[in-house]
Image: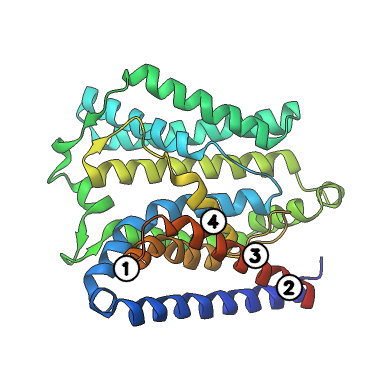
Amino acid sequence: MNFAKIELGRYRMQLGLIVVFFLVFALFIITSPRVFLRPTIYLAFLSTVPFVGIMGLGLTFVLVSGEIDMSFPSVMAFSGYICATVFSATGSVALGVLGGLVSGAGIGMLNGLFVRKIGIPSIVVTLGMMFLVRGCVNVLSGGLGKSLTALIGNPWYNVLVGKVGGLIPAQSLWFIALSIILWFILFRHEFGNYVLFVGDNEGAARMMGINVDKTKTMVFVLMGALSAFAGLIDSFRLLKWWPTMGEGFMLTTFATVFVGGTSMFGGEGSILGTFIGAFLIGSLEAGIVAAGLSGFWTQVIYGLLILIAVTIHTLLRRGG
């Protein structure tokens, strides 16, 4: 791998994405100044964007490793259910959070074992797991939600989704912190180097002594844990767990990652790109509606943005 060339290409793509990001928000400000010149809309984004963004960070690792995961929306719901159930049974928020995170990581581990030990393509494994886990959620819950209003005033609630300084949603700070940590892991840590090598050329990585099976399995575990965390904080924010939690997140999460510049073919990705892409995708619907367009235009704009972004990223890679 030519790391200098890859680094240069990644910085060019990230710069291009930042320019697109500011152009889109400039357009929003021009078309809807009464909405986008007020801080309330940005605080709303800080409240809602992190759920997709956190799962997007995990999906970035999965795609960089050369695999794919489609089970994360169901994992989000399942882990939220485990957390709510454990909390209701024990009254302990810490045990509920731990149970939710462990359940998500466990499903990720199962995905990794099916993919690496049995040799089933990841798209097949995770698609099957998506239906299996969602089905288990519906069977276990009987299609009924769980109230979490008892969390009000609990320190865990304030830490995970409270308002820092009475203004900034805590989940946005978690998203920022996770983005920084995972950036260092992917680009400045041995494990991240393994993920990049494995995604770029699995055979060469194996010849270099990298444990490919372990690396890819751990990537699925990370995806499961991050999906679980997103489910937990979403449940805490709403003070309610619903069996339908996570539905509708798949396409926006994939859009976030692809717009951010992560390659579908493995070996290349951008944590900063995913971070920016999350806010870009998360703000589109509000910007479209505020501009006076019908909400039906949302998917049209999503599609155009993805195609334009992926085209720009591809051309920049070729030019690099």
Answer few, some or many: residues within 10 Å of disc 3's Cα (few below 14, many 20 plus, some between 14 and 19): some
Q: Is residue 283 above or below residue 73?
A: below
Residue at horizontal 51%, vertical 48%? 251
| Amino acid marked by disc 2 | Leu
| Amino acid marked by disc 1 | Gly
> Circle 4 — which element?
helix
Residue at horizontal 30%, vertical 76%? 32
| Among the two numbered marks 4 and 1 on one chain, the one whose residue lies closer to the N terminus | 4
Location of the C terminus by quadrant is bottom right
Name the residue nearer the viewer: 142 or 301. 301
Q: Pointer 2: what residue? A: 315
Specify whether 161 is left or right of 75. Answer: left
| Among the two numbered marks 1 and 2 on one chain, the one whose residue lies closer to the N terminus | 1
Residue at horizontal 39%, vertical 51%? 51
Answer few, some or many: residues within 10 Å of disc 4's Cα (few below 14, many 20 plus, some between 14 and 19): many
Q: Pointer 3: what residue? A: 310
